[in-house]
Amino acid sequence: MQVVDLSQDIYEGMQVYPGHLKTVQFEHATHEETAPRFDSGFSFQTTGFMLNDNGPTHVDSFSHLDPDPAAPTIDKMPLDLFFGPAVCLDVTGFRPRTDITAEDLDRVEAASPVTVQPGDIVLFHTGTWNRFAGDKRYLTEFAGLGESASEWIVRRGVKTFGVDSPTPDNPASTSYPCHMMCRRERI
């Protein structure tokens, strides 16, 4: 088995989806403030760190998508949703602000060296992070998974999926069919 680290730096000023809490780091206690508590010369400092439960990790907890009070928050979601066999499909060839369809995903999969199996994690490589990290275009210049592509995820039995863009939906969409599928199916 090979483990692939998909983490990214989390820092003050990082791009977060509009409307999400911005990441903030701050000095909470300094060495100068804590030294008087001790008689040995010991002191410590602590730094506060605030981030929202969605933006910097960009894990859409079920409660993020679903207004049902019983929808699990990120800390209540099963850990096994976040690891397992995974494949990556390259969807970099689609025009920004358009919908990727189920037929498109069938073509991408057929042209790739991998096959999506039930229970897999599927990572959709849009190239957005590579092209626009730190640039406001990161929030708008990518294609998204349209309604039929979202239903493709369900039909294929995908356990979890991810994108390297700030949302799996087309940024021009106002209906967010992929998020609505995730709400309904708890994917």
Image: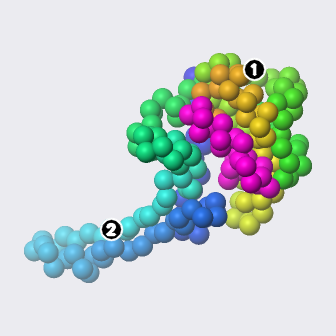
Q: Residue at (14%, 75%) from the top-left corner? A: 37
Q: Is residue 175 magenta?
A: yes
Rendered location of residue 18, percent (x, y): 64, 64
Q: In which quarter of the image is residue 162?
A: top right
Residue 132 shown left or right of residue 60 in the figure: right
Relative to 127, is 85 above or below? Answer: above
Q: Which amino acid does label 1 sit on?
A: Thr
Residue 61 shown left or right of residue 129 in the figure: left
Residue lying furthest left in this view? 39
Residue range in magenta is 163-187
Q: Quadrant of the C terminus?
A: top right
- Magenta stretch prevailing secondary structure: loop
Per the image, the residue denoted by label 1 is 115
Q: Residue at (75%, 28%) from the top-left corner? A: 152
* Residue 162 seen anywhere in this rendered image of the structure: no
Q: Quadrant of residue 119?
A: top right
Q: Which amino acid does label 2 sit on?
A: Thr
Rendered location of residue 66, percent (x, y): 54, 44
Per the image, the residue denoted by label 2 is 46
Q: Residue at (78%, 45%) from the top-left corner? A: 144
**Disc assigned to residue 3:** none
Q: Does the magenta stretch include residue 17?
A: no
> Spatial distance from mark 1 to mark 2, Cα to Cα?
47 Å
Q: In which quarter of the image is residue 92?
A: top right
Rendered location of residue 72, percent (x, y): 44, 40
**Helix, strand or loop at disc 2?**
strand
Mark 1 Cα within 10 Å, few/some/many (few <14, many 20+)?
few
Mark 2 Cα within 10 Å, few/some/many (few <14, many 20+)?
few
Q: Residue at (68%, 26%) from the top-left corner? A: 154
Q: Nearer the viewer, residue 162 or 186?
A: 186
Count of picture labels: 2
